[in-house]
Image (cartoon, rainbow, N blue to C red):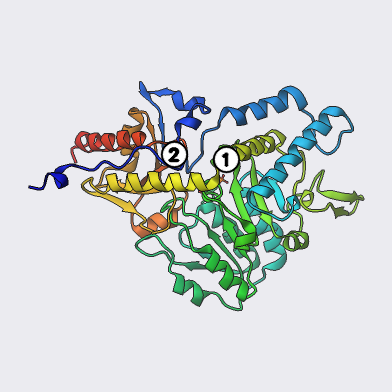
């Protein structure tokens, strides 16, 4: 027997792209002990952990510059306004928007999409117009369009997904027509991890004069995203999925589109002049930001972006690719483990089932070992229905995860199989 082939080759543990230990020290929560075991946090697709730099930026704001923005002529208000607007600039640079006026603060991806469905959709979409979505959308990029379509009598069309979790591109080319008013699609699937061919989708849509909205909740935190290069019309993402705070998110929109839209909500800040019977609107982005915004959240998101920029988004993307390849290889040797989604271009999200072990039972077992995973329909019930399953277990990585954590996870999957006697 050839001894060389008998030696099992272990993939290298160290990455050339980044060393997670350089960053884990900034995330105190990663040292938590859960059910007597060191925490392994594999639920980053749902929400990520926050480094001290973000936590400190938020507490610094409350400790040293807490005041309302834009309105006060006093030192604290000016300081708060400068920090708030500085975050907007950081976000614009981060996604390569041409001006910070294209950056609207929202509560998150869901609110950003609802904003477009309401303020753009109600003005421009009429009866018998069509909106193209895909079958792999998160409920946040599905339900707002259902509400709009029901209200104005428009029709929703769906690009199907194939067995490997990629979209059926030729069907998209057939669906788009003179009746299409908008294409709204996820950049990266939160179930399959698939990175959709959005550049191609945008080019084809624009050739027909159709704008494109990208649900970038799973892409902006994990990949370099350049709105000028992609040429998307709208882009939505959430702060809490990119080491930022909850309750803050972003809508990017092309200037002309934002200027032509109706306001989203009425109130302070979004107006230019108000009379008893009517009002005129403020300039973008303020036209879409009624009321006192989430100032601390915006400042925290700015600190998150500084942190991500220091690591480099390309390094993050390549490192997560390495973790995902490592995990997929190890998982492929587990008997009866089925992975949903085999796209060649994918991010660090893996959905799976093992035989008929219920995902809730499996995730409970893993939780007892300190491993946080997600089980359920992942806010994508139409995907589950098409796959004829109730739920999956999902692991999702970020730059602070390690190959050692994946090794422990794999060991515990084996233990779960023994435990459930499968
Ligand atoms: N879109 C996708 C693809 C997501 O994964 C999520 C969250 O899981 C959302 C939208 C909604 O994000 P949020 O709950 O932050 O609004």
Element carrying mark 2: loop
At 84% from the left edge and 51% from the top edge, which residue is drawn? 282
Q: How many marks?
A: 2
Quarter holding residue 203: bottom right
- Residue at figure coordinates x 43%, y 52% from the top left: 193
Residue at position x 47%, y 49% in the image: 379
Would you identify the image quadrant in which residue 258 lies?
bottom right
Spatial CA distance of label 1 from label 2 is 19 Å
Q: Is residue 284 above or below residue 61?
A: below
Asked whether residue 407 is in view, the answer is yes
Asked if residue 75 lies left or right of residue 347, the reply is: right
Camera-nearest residue between 356 and 174: 174
Query: What label sits on residue 43 in the rendered view?
Result: 2
Query: Mark 1 or mark 2: which is in front?
Result: 1
The dot on residue 150 is none
- On the rendered image, what quadrant is the C terminus found in? top left
Secondary structure under the numbered disc 1 in the rendered image: helix
Q: Is residue 100 above or below residue 197?
A: above
Residue 241 placement, left or right of 295: left
Identified at 64% across, 67% down, the residue is 211
Label 1: how many Cα within 10 Å (few below 14, some 14–19, many 20+)? some
Mark 1 lies on residue: 308
Most distant residue in the left direction: 1
Q: Position of residue 288 (x, y in %)?
A: 75, 50
Q: Position of residue 311 (x, y in %)?
A: 54, 39
């Amino acid at each position: 027997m050839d001894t060389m082939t008998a030696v099992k080759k272990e993939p290298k543990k160290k990455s050339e792209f980044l060393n997670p230990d350089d960053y884990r020290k900034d995330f105190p929560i990663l040292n938590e002990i859960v059910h007597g075991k060191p925490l392994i946090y594999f639920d980053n697709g749902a929400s990520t952990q926050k480094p001290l730099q973000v936590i400190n930026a938020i507490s610094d704001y409350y400790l040293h510059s807490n005041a309302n923005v834009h309105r006060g002529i006093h030192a604290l208000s000016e300081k708060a306004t400068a920090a708030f607007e500085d975050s907007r600039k950081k976000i614009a640079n981060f996604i390569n928007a041409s001006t910070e006026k294209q950056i609207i603060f929202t509560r998150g991806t869901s609110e950003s999409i609802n904003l477009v469905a309401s303020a753009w959709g109600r003005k421009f979409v009429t009866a018998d117009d069509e909106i193209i979505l895909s079958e792999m959308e998160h409920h946040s990029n599905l339900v707002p369009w259902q509400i709009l379509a029901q209200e104005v009598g428009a029709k929703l069309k769906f690009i199907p997904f194939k067995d490997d979790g990629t979209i059926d591109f030729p069907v998209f080319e057939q669906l788009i027509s003179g009746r299409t008013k908008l294409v709204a699609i996820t950049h990266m699937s939160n179930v399959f991890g698939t990175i959709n061919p959005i550049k191609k989708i945008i080019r084809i849509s624009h050739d027909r004069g159709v704008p494109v909205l990208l649900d970038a909740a799973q892409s902006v935190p994990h990949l370099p995203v350049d709105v000028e290069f992609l040429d998307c019309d709208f882009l939505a993402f959430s702060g809490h999925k990119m080491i930022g705070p909850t309750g803050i998110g972003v809508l990017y929109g092309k200037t002309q589109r934002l200027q032509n839209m109706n306001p989203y909500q009425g109130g302070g800040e979004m107006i230019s002049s108000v009379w008893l019977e009517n009002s005129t609107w403020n300039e973008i982005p303020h036209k879409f930001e009624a009321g006192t915004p989430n100032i601390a959240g915006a400042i925290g998101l700015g600190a998150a972006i500084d942190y991500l920029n220091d690591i480099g988004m390309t390094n993050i993307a390549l490192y997560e690719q390495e973790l995902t390849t490592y995990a997929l290889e190890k998982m492929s040797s587990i008997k009866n483990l089925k992975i949903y989604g085999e796209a060649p271009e994918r991010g660090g999200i893996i959905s799976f089932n093992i035989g008929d072990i219920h995902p809730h039972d499996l995730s409970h077992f893993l939780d007892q070992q300190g491993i946080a995973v997600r089980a359920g329909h992942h806010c994508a019930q139409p995907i589950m229905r098409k796959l004829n399953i109730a739920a999956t277990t999902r692991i999702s990585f970020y730059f602070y995860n390690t190959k050692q954590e994946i090794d422990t996870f794999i060991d515990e999957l084996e233990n779960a199989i023994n435990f459930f006697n499968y």
